[in-house]
Each structure stands twice: as structure tokens, then as C-alpha cells.
Image: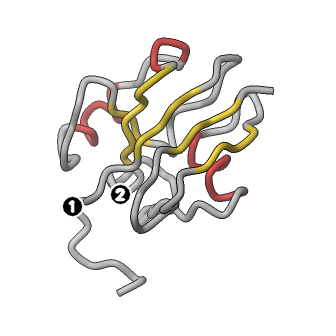
Amino acid sequence: MPQIVFLPNDEHCPEGAVVEAQTGETIIEAALRNGIDIEHACEMSCACTTCHVVVREGFSSLEASDELEDDMLDKAWGLEPESRLSCQARVGDTDLVVEIPRYTINQVSEKH
């Protein structure tokens, strides 16, 4: 079973976290199941960028993003070559190291 290492993030997992992931589940599904509350304003329907993450290790093991995800990622804050929407990136057989960006472009958060 692959693991996802979430790098420390002040808001979502201050100490960082290592979670077990199931092959085929999305990064956000694994995060939420383990108490890491990544924002997902569109309810994981690939209609926003609030669940944007940067895959620091294991990026090449993910299936390629589709055109819709690429179009949404163009709007993400802090876009990098290894950026993905965590609601679309499905875990393969390889461990991942994931960074949750400090900001999103979401102007209104239900948490605040």
C-alpha cells in the first residue's frame, strides 16, 4: 500500500503527516480520510483550484492530468510544474511527497 507524506503546513497539518493510501483513490480522499482537511470548495468536481497541491516526489507515477484539470490549474495560486488538483490526482503504486500550498485563490472560505 503506497504512502503519502504531507509536508508540514501551518493550517492543515502543522507537524506534517504520513498516511496510507489506497491505489486508485485521489490524494484528497486519502488526506480527508486521515484528518487532513484540504479545502475543496467545489466538492471535488474539478471546478475550482482550492485543493491544489504540489507533488514533490512521485509525480511521474500519477496518471497525466486531463484538459479540464489543466485549464483549472492555470488559475491556481503558486502553480508549479508538479502541481495537481488533489481531487483529480489518483494514487498509483508509488509513494508520494505532497506539499499543500499556503494560499488558494478562494476569496471566501467557509472556515473563516
Is 92 on the left or on the right of 53, as rendered? right
Q: What quarter of the picture does the C terminus occupy?
A: bottom left
Q: Which residue is mark 2?
A: 50
Residue 74's image quarter?
Answer: top left
Up the image or down, 18 lies above or below 1; here it is below
Query: Residue 90: x, y in percent?
Result: 59, 30
Disc 1 to disc 2, C-alpha distance: 7 Å
Q: SS at mark 2?
A: loop
x, y percentage for residue 102? 29, 57
What crowding class fits label 1: few (fewer than 14 Cα within 10 Å), some (14-19), or many (20 or more)?
A: few
**Crowd around label 2: few <14 · some 14–19 · many ≥20 (10 Å):** many
Q: Nearer the viewer, residue 100 or 90?
A: 100
Please tell me which residue lies in front, 90 or 112: 112
For badge 1, the amino acid type reads Ile
Describe residue 59's horizontal placement relative to residue 54 as left or right.
right
On the image, the x and y values in percent for residue 72 come to 27, 42
Circle 1/circle 2 CB separation < 8 Å: yes
Which residue is disc 1 drawn over?
A: 105
Location of residue 24 in the rendering, given as x and y in whole percent from the top left corner: 71, 29
The residue positioned 62% from the left and 52% from the top of the image is: 31
Q: Earlier in the sequence, mark 1 or mark 2?
A: 2
